[in-house]
Image: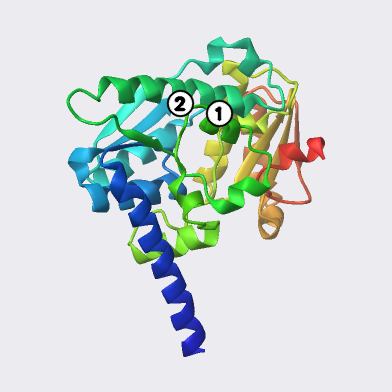
Amino acid sequence: MQTALTTQSDALAAKHERLVSLIQPMGRVIVAFSGGIDSTLVLKVSLDTLGPQNVLAATGISPSLPQRELQSVKDLAAALSAPLRLIQTSEMDSPNYTSNPANRCYFCKTELYSKLTVLAESMSGKSAQPTILNGLNLDDTGDHRPGISAAREWKIRSPLLEARLTKSDVRALANHLNLPNWEKPALACLSSRIPYGTPVTIQSLSQIERAEEFLRDQGFTNIRVRHHSTLARIEVDAQDLPRLLEEPLRSNLLQHLKQLGYTYVTLDLQGFRSGSTNETLK
């Protein structure tokens, strides 16, 4: 058993070294920072490798980012002593995005990466232009991720992917580096709760955010409130489903979601699963 643990530790250490060796020659970087564990790890290793004077965390702000996540971004950046730039993005002004096609994420990432590229160009001056990094890991390539195409087009580097780190590698390394969010559940923008083809609106994003906020305040961790017009389809971990039927939570949940504008509230018996909207594409 000890040999197996040692081998696993050695393999992780080798991937960490590979990650450092990828970032070190870049000199200066901008990290597309979402506050999730992947981009947090990229930010941490960049800070340790290049120093805070050569690293900038940049976060896109739009109605699809929950306010709780925005606060998390600020708190994490402060905890890591990372310089942070908040950038207002305008994907909601584009019908390519708001019409919610299956490649919606491509237009969102294009908007973000184009603005990060302008930022990088403005920072060049007498020094080399910073390299833009994202938090894509090896497991992400197995899902429907139109944003990957945008990253290629804008020449965004993905050091976790290049170092062949899986999601479990990311969590293990983040734990080793004492990152406070190493166990944080995977999150996605609020627009991902809306079925493809259904328009994304400020109102629907607000409904989703406030519905999920209620559930998080009740102690649920893995949550999605899928928005089907007047119907809210709730996903939580399967073992948490019975708790949603207990009183007074059931009645309070119904009252809250109906006040938000939902006529029907349903529980998805399959439970929480990241990316369930993509099931319609298969």
Dot 2 corresponds to which residue? 113
Q: Secondary structure at mark 1?
A: helix
Look at 68% across and 39% down and name the residue there.
144
The alpha-carbon separation of the residues under discs 1 and 2 comes to 8 Å
Number of other residues with Cα within 10 Å of mark 1, as a class: few under 14, some 14 to 19, many 20 or more: many
Asked if marks 1 and 2 touch (Cβ < 8 Å), the reply is yes
Look at 68% across and 49% down and name the residue there.
272
Q: Secondary structure at mark 2?
A: helix
Image position of 30 (left or right of 89): left
Dot 1 corresponds to which residue? 150
Look at 49% across and 20% down and name the residue there.
111
Look at 58% across and 22% down and name the residue there.
107
Relative to 228, residue 282 above or below: below
Number of other residues with Cα within 10 Å of mark 2, as a class: few under 14, some 14 to 19, many 20 or more: many
Q: Quadrant of residue 172?
A: bottom left
Nearer-the-camera pick, 135 or 99: 135
Nearer-the-camera pick, 53 or 201: 53
Image position of 259 (left or right of 214): right
The amino acid pointed to by label 1 is Ala
Q: Is residue 14 visible?
A: yes
The amino acid pointed to by label 2 is Tyr
